[in-house]
Image: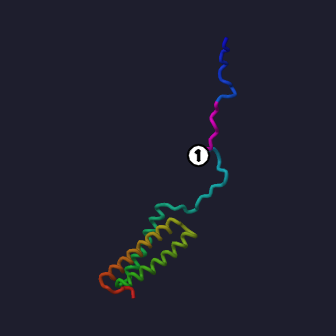
Amino acid sequence: MARPDPGPDPDAVARPAARTPSGLFPAGPPTRPTYREPHPVTGGGVAAGGGAAAAWLVLFGLLGTGVASYAWWTVVAGLLAWTTALVLVRLGDRGVAAGVAIVTAGGWSIAAAVVAVKWATGGDWPLW
């Protein structure tokens, strides 16, 4: 005579394994302190820095009377703008500093293109 099946062993029931949480849904307070930036980078800050740098470069570029003076005024204005951006990175708003640096690099690229076109069409290096 066969014995009846007693059913599953209560100690052998499969239990779900504990998983490490992904961090998407925090289970409690963080294990270490969270530090917030005093001046986070925002799109508005980058745009403000870019606008200020563009106006700065245009004003200095208008002082030039020819290609050479325009290029040198742009180099001087860019150096002053990047110095200001370095100070802003250290002491102020990094977003504004990023906008200043990006637009200054673009302004220098435009000045370099103007010098290159003048050099290519005239055959003489325009900066000396």
Residue bearing mark 1: 22
- Quadrant in the picture for the C terminus: bottom left
Please indicate whether residue 104 sits to the left or right of residue 14 in the image.
left
Mark 1 packing: few (<14 Cα in 10 Å), some, or many (20+)? few
Compared to residue 17, the image places residue 8 above or below, namely: above
- Report the predominant secondary structure element of the magenta stretch: loop
Inspect the image, locate mark 1, and give the three-letter code of the amino acid beneath it.
Ser
Residue 83: image location, x then y, percent: 52, 76
Residue 50 in picture, x, y percent from top left: 44, 68
Q: Nearer the viewer, residue 111 or 70?
A: 111
**Residue 36 within the magenta-colored segment of the rendering:** no
The residue furthest left is 121
Q: Quadrant of residue 89?
A: bottom right
Q: Tell me which residue sits at (39%, 79%) in the image.
A: 61
As drawn, which residue projects farthest toward the right? 11
The quarter holding residue 73 reads: bottom left
Task: Give whichever of 63, 124 is nearer the camera.
Answer: 124
Check disc 1 and report its element: helix, strand or loop. loop
The residues colored magenta run 14-21
**Residue 72 as seen in the image, left or right of residue 12:** left
| Residue 107 % position (x, y) | 41, 74
Residue at screen point 51% across, 72% down? 85
Q: Quadrant location of residue 55?
A: bottom left
View extreme (front): residue: 1
Give yes or no for residue 16 being in the magenta stretch.
yes
Q: Residue at x 70, y 28 (%)?
A: 11
Furthest residue toward top: 1
For the N terminus, which image quadrant?
A: top right
